């Protein structure tokens, strides 16, 4: 059974710092992995999607890596800003006929001005 | 439309009442998902549609939960005889095709009193 774990559960950093959020999954049989952002009371915003055949994806100050064999992904945020404060969730799309995403519990990030 | 739209935004129901939650996906999106997110938890998969066909309903917690997408666009999640444990945010997501990034609505927050 696929399980997704995110570390740390919460993180507080001063503005301008570079930071790394971690996601691990137990079964490497995945189609892709997505990183999402969730603001309080809001839905989820897709940040980056990495296909199982890819190693990383970049968008602006965000870079996500995927090591499928070891079951790990990282989300790197460069030069953090107060507007980056949110909960970041990773989710894997399991392989096979089952098309559902399996989610981590998220990392709650606070960036202090 | 510009994004996935869900209504109502908030719903308070007395225990035992029936509720209906609506999702308007992005026009042309083939795939539609419903997720349930309890406070402080990641989203839990409920059901998946490809066009009008409900291909996976393995996440529906009981036979009180029913989802439909009769014309392959708008979807309705119905919960009969609501219970307090049904209180959660119900998220709808759509994507243009399988394994594409999901686009989420802002969710419906259901509170059962």
Image: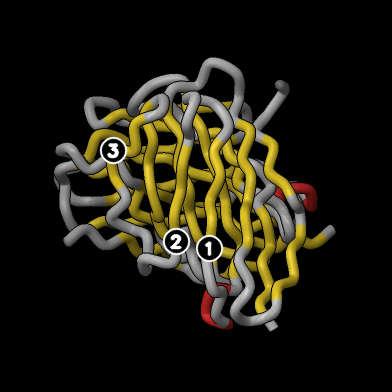
Q: Nearer the viewer, mark 2 or mark 3?
A: 2
Q: Residue furthest top?
A: B28
**Numbered mark located on residue A86 in the image:** none
Q: CA distance from mark 3 to mark 1?
A: 19 Å
Q: CA distance from mark 2 to mark 1?
A: 5 Å
Which residue is depicted at the point 53% across and 39% down?
B93
Closer-to-camera residue (B78/A39): B78
CB within 8 Å, label 3 to label 1: no
The answer to whether tags 2 and 1 share a subunit is yes
Q: Helix, strand, or loop for circle 3?
A: strand
Task: Decide if residue B7 is on the left or right side of residue B58.
Answer: right
x%, y% of residue A16? Answer: 73, 49
The quarter of the image holding the N terminus of chain B is top right
x%, y% of residue A92? Answer: 33, 46
**Residue linked to disc 3:** B55
Q: First in sequence: mark 2 or mark 3?
A: 3
Q: First in sequence: mark 3 or mark 1?
A: 3
x%, y% of residue A49? Answer: 43, 32
Q: First in sequence: mark 2 or mark 1?
A: 2
Which residue is depicted at the point 59% across and 69% down?
B88
Q: Residues within 10 Å of mark 2 (few under 14, many from 20)?
A: many
x%, y% of residue A6? Answer: 41, 63
Q: Quadrant of residue B99?
A: top left
Q: Residues within 10 Å of mark 3 (few under 14, many from 20)?
A: some
CB within 8 Å, label 2 to label 1: yes
Q: Helix, strand, or loop for circle 1?
A: strand
Task: Decide if residue A16 is on the left or right side of residue B70.
Answer: right
**Numbered mark located on residue B79 in the image:** 1
Q: Is residue B40 visible?
A: no
**Residue linked to disc 2:** B65
């Amino acid at each position: 059974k696929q399980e997704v774990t995110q570390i740390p559960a919460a993180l507080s950093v001063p503005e301008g710092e570079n930071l790394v959020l971690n996601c691990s999954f137990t079964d490497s049989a995945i189609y892709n992995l997505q990183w999402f952002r969730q603001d309080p009371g809001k839905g989820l915003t897709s940040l980056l999607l990495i296909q199982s055949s890819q190693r990383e994806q970049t968008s602006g100050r965000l870079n996500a890596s995927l090591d499928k064999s070891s079951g790990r992904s990282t989300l790197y945020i460069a030069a953090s800003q107060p507007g980056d404060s949110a909960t970041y969730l990773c989710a894997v799309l399991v392989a096979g006929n089952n098309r559902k995403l399996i989610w981590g519990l998220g990392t709650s990030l606070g960036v202090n001005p | 439309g510009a994004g996935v739209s869900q209504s109502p935004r908030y719903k308070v129901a007395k225990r035992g009442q029936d509720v209906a939650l609506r999702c308007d996906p992005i026009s042309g999106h083939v795939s539609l998902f419903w997720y349930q997110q309890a406070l402080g938890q990641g989203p839990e998969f409920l059901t998946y549609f490809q066009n009008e066909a409900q291909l996976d309903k393995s996440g529906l917690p009981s036979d009180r939960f029913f989802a439909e997408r009769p014309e392959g666009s708008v979807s309705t999640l119905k919960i009969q005889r609501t219970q307090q444990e049904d209180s959660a945010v119900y998220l709808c997501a759509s994507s243009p095709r399988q394994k594409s990034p999901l686009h989420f609505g802002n969710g419906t927050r259901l509170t059962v009193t």
